[in-house]
Amino acid sequence: MIFVLLIMTTASLIGEIYASDVKIPESVTLVPSNDLCEDAELIEGPYPVSGTGTNIDATVDCPTLLNWNGVWYTIELPYAINDISITICGITENLSNTGIALTDDCACDDYISVTGITFLDEGQCSSGFDGIELTFNGIPGDINEDSLAYWPALAENEEGQAMDFAYTVNITEGVPPPQGDNCADPIIIPSFPYSDTLNSCDFNNDHNFGGEDVVYQFDLDTCSIMTFSLCQTDPIFDTYLLLYNSDCGETPIKTNDDSCMAPGEYGTSELIDTLEAGIYHIIVDAYSWECGQYILDVWSEPCVYSGACCVLAECIGTMTQAGCDSFDGEWFIAEDCAEDYSCPGSCLEYLPGDANMYNGSWPPGVIGGDVTYLVNYFRGMPASQPCFLDSFWGSADANGDCNIIGSDVTKLVAYFRGVTSLGYCIDYETCWPIPEDVPVEAPADWPNCESSGPIGY
């Protein structure tokens, strides 16, 4: 009795330990084995290939691009051009929503959109439940170095909940896309004006903007004002134009939508831009998966440059070179008279003590008016208008201490009395204009030297 009682007591203690210390979880959460892109499940031929999967407990993928609670597959691409169909059906309930994209890697930076969507009822799925068929046409076999397309699979029921699913993947050899389908094989615009009529429905959606798109390339030898117009397209559909540089990169130079239309209306586009010499691409695209026949007209005009026009060292206006030639002036491209452009020859002297910078007589020199000018300067009057302030600073520094101060007036007065010579700051070498700026009435032996510092030409 004692032995049996001891066993029963021990057993009771063990039961109490199990009951108090061991916790059995009510449910176990296990993410699918192909939950991450890096763990994608491989689908390889011979095609068609069927299988099953689940999105139940899958984590979020590509939150900034897709934001799907999906799982991942890689699909082997056997042809140079591949037409892919993916059928997804519910196993225990109807499938209501699925993903509609392929990618070329795990970077989550772009995707390939479907070219066709077919909704399948229960009679078209072997499982007996509703499903969806996705079609991706024209997928190149060299989409990446491994010839694999990445499929982020999403399966949701009518309540938007993750579910089990069955899939079938089939691949057939596709027809190579027409010229102009992408930036690697653009339609070349040989000259301007240019016009082309095509149907964008015959092309693929390579630029993920909206509908199918067509790529053109053109080369400019010189600066041109370019116009790209879809205004003659009839019947109208919601077009879009994108202008890219030579590498056809991610960010367009300029875009346009609906410029041919009245305010508030949607339809055809026109893009106008000034382009320097180089290679460019113009892409005919569309919104909302639209496509259709379009007419693209392209023409160019030479760039019109403006510049400052100088007549007798005076800036008379900002105009074209032809306009300046009509005044027998000298034209300086990209300079602007309205921005205080100083014409060459407007300041011809940089003599220490020449405070008024007067060049009405020849040769220029230090005269009595310089004292008056310096006195007025100290009273708050501005420096000589045709000349830059730093030029005035260098010339009005009569005493050579690298500052314009009251003692410069004293030095000038002493100079006119013949009791002193003028000095100059070592940063501002006393010098005449460089030879090409010397007026025609200058003497033949005019010194040939170039000044240094900000006071020089």
Image: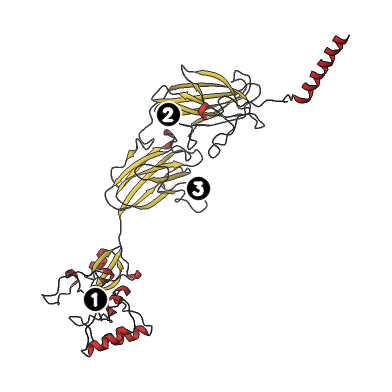
Residue 386 visible in the current orientation: no
Q: Amino acid at mark 2?
A: Gly
Q: Amino acid at mark 3?
A: Tyr
Residue drawn at point x = 33 percent, y = 49 percent: 299
Q: Which residue is mark 1?
A: 350
Query: Which image quadrant: the C terminus?
Result: bottom left
The numbered mark at residue 138 is 2
Marks 2 and 3 sit apart, C-alpha to C-alpha, by: 29 Å
Q: Residues within 10 Å of mark 2 (few under 14, many from 20)?
A: many
- Residue at left offset 42%, top offset 37%: 200
Between marks 3 and 1, how big is the CA–CA gap?
64 Å
Label 1 sits on a secondary structure element that is loop
Q: Label 3 belongs to which residue?
A: 266
Query: Relative to 438, is 23 on the left or the right?
Result: right
Query: Helix, strand or loop at disc 3?
Result: loop
Q: CA distance from mark 2 to mark 1?
A: 73 Å
Q: Is residue 69 above or below residue 49?
A: below
